[in-house]
Every structure is written in structure tokens, then in C-alpha cells.
Amino acid sequence: MNFSNIAAAMSMSPPLASILINNYNYARFLREAIDSALKQDYPAKEVLVVDDGSTDNSREIISSYGDRIVPIFKENGGQSSAFNAGVAASRGDILCFLDADDFFHPDKVSRVVEAFRQQGLNSKPMMVHHLLAVKGNGDVEARTYGKTHDSPMNLYAFAQRYRFIWYEAGPTTTISINRNLAQKIFPLPEQGVRISGDDFIVCGASLLAEVYSLKDVLGGYRIHGENLWFRSDRRKSPEFLRTLENYLNDKLTENGLSPVICFDSSIYAWPVLVAERRWLKLAWHMLRLSVKQHDRYTAEFVYHTVMTIGMLGMQNLRRGTRRLRSALDL
């Protein structure tokens, strides 16, 4: 028996990919999401469907698939709790997340696994993300949704200087991580995190891992009336940001890095101060960081903020003019 040949064959065996579908009251889309996971052209996969206490007929749909999927039924706890339940039950080397109102293209998992294998699979913490086609009113539209960047990306040095990081990926359905990274960033905080659980995954990965973006469109993003995140104004509450900040700093400390995130003391706070019309605090904030950081990035953000304030002023002026004309007409 040639043990070297056996070892070589084992090393070439496809890594197991776990597809984690999180669902809450998306019964009318759920079957398409599950079917898209089962129809992947990648053979070594498991499909886990986490139902977060749905009150529609989601449970019946999930149960109809029998042993083709791994069903996880839990009380309603929000998106982070659904992610935690799915990751804890998964066995894969690669974890691919899928929102129940979205779907994968047939080659999604095979393309993502290949990207991980090219970089060493589980040799280091990694995240891979890609683009999605936007689907609304029954048809896939020409535009795409997501972000791309130079790869690999890690934002810890950025965070050290600027005290915050941006969300540099697409929504949940674009995200895949390896087991190495999952062990570093899970479990996620659950208290008060009803939506936007993917913020913890993406931001955690951006600080602790190598992040790779693919320019391929590997799935569909559905826009509809119940899409909670897409229909929101997308501004995070102070409570959410405190939870995210504490989580990121805890994970940095656990991995031997300095806890550097402070959203309120960073450029990240400026759009919030503009929205709240807190002009004196904004002016002091901008002056202090311009002197302290004194670089092109900060200067560009100052310019962008000033232009935003100017546009708000013009809008208020037009609104006042219209009111004046209406009063004169009376």
C-alpha cells in the first residue's frame, strides 16, 4: 500500500462547504433559496436552514426537504442568533451565508471554495465575498450589488489610525468565511441585534483576517417590501454601534491586538452629527481630527462633509422659499 499516494489523494479531496440559510417569515422566498443551495455544482456540501421563530408556514417548507437539509428550529432571537445557531451546528471547512429571500447561482460555492483553496484553505483566517444581481418585480435587473476592493484586504492598520472601519463587503448572501476565521469571531452578540448581524462578521474579518473580493456575480439579491435592511435608512443606532464597538475591541484583545475602535471619536461620527444638526460638536470634531490626523483622507472627508452641509442648506433655503411663496399667495 502506497501511503504517500493515499495522503496525496486525501489532500486533494474537496473540502466540505456549509451553506447556512437564515430565515424569518420569508416562506414565499424560502423554497427558491433552499433549492439554489441544493443545486450547487459543488459536490461536498451541507445545507443548514435556521428558522428564527417564523410565524408563517416556513417550518412546513423546511420540513418538506427531509434529510436533504439540516433543519434548525429556534425561538425568535434576531439575525445574529440565527447565525450563531447555524455556525454551531455546521461541519464545513467553508461557511457560506445565504439570506432566505436571496439565492445562489449554481457555481457560487465552487467559485468561492476555489478562491479559498488558492490562498491555503484554512491555513489563516479568511473571508471571501462577491457581487449579486439585483432582483425586483420578478426579474433579474442589469445592475449589481456589492463592493470590490484590492485583495487581500485587512483594515487593522486603518483602524489604528482612524479609530473605525467601514463595512467593505456586500450583504449577507455575498459572504463566505473559513473555519479558521469562524473560530475567532463567533459567537456574535445577540442582545439587541435584530438585523445587520453581518456587520459583526464583515468588520471582525476586516480586522482579524485577509478579505478577498471577487468581481463575479454569484447570486441574486431580492428587493421587496419586507426587506428590513434595504428599506431602512441604514443608519445604525447608538446602541448597535456600542455593541459592535465592544465586540470588535474584545475580539482584537483576544487575538493579541490593541482595542482601537471608537466610533464616537472618529470620522465615522460626522454623518450622524450632520443628520442630528449638532453643528458645534461637529465643528469641534472636524477641527480636532484635522489637526491630529492631518492627512489627505481626513481632508477629503472634511470636504465631503462641508459639501453635504451646503446641500442641506440649499434644501432648507428652497423649502423656506416655497413656504414664503405659499404664504404670499394666500
Image (tube, rainbow, N blue to C red):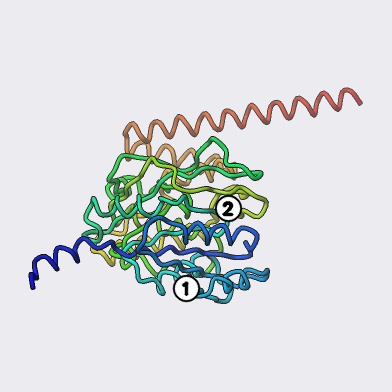
What separation in Å lies between label 2 and label 1 (alpha carbons)? Answer: 26 Å
Spot occupied by residue 273 in the image (x, y as percentages of width and height): 53, 44
Q: Is residue 15 above or below residue 202?
A: below
Q: Nearer the viewer, residue 221 or 325?
A: 221
State the quadrant of the N terminus. bottom left
| SS for dot 1 | strand
* Location of residue 256 by image quarter: bottom left
Q: Residue at x 45, y 29 (%)?
A: 303
| Mark 2 Cα shell of 10 Å, populated few (<14), some (14-19), many (≥20) | few
User: Taking 182 as reference, is 212 above or below it?
Assistant: above
Amino acid beneath label 1: Val
Mark drawn on residue 70? 1
> In front: mark 2 or mark 1?
1
Horizontal and vertical percent position of residue 56: 68, 68
Q: Which tag, 2 or 1, sits closer to the chain's start? A: 1
Q: Which residue is mark 2?
A: 229
Q: Residue furthest front?
A: 1
In the rendering, at what x and y percent does residue 223 appear?
Answer: 61, 47
Question: Is 211 left, or right, of 57 in this rendering?
Answer: left
**Which residue is drawn at the image coordinates 52% and 62% (left, top)?**
34
- In the picture, the quarter occupied by the C terminus is top right
Please determine whether, in this image, residue 330 is positioned above or below residue 109: above
The percent position of residue 16, horizontal first and vertical second, equals 33, 65
Res 293 → quadrant: top left
**Residue 200 placement, left or right of 310:** left
Q: Mark 2: which amino acid? A: Trp
Please name the residue shown 52% across and 28% down the image. Answer: 307
Tell me what residue is drawn at x 21 percent, y 55 percent.
120
Q: Relative to the observer, which residue lies in front, 86 or 242? A: 86
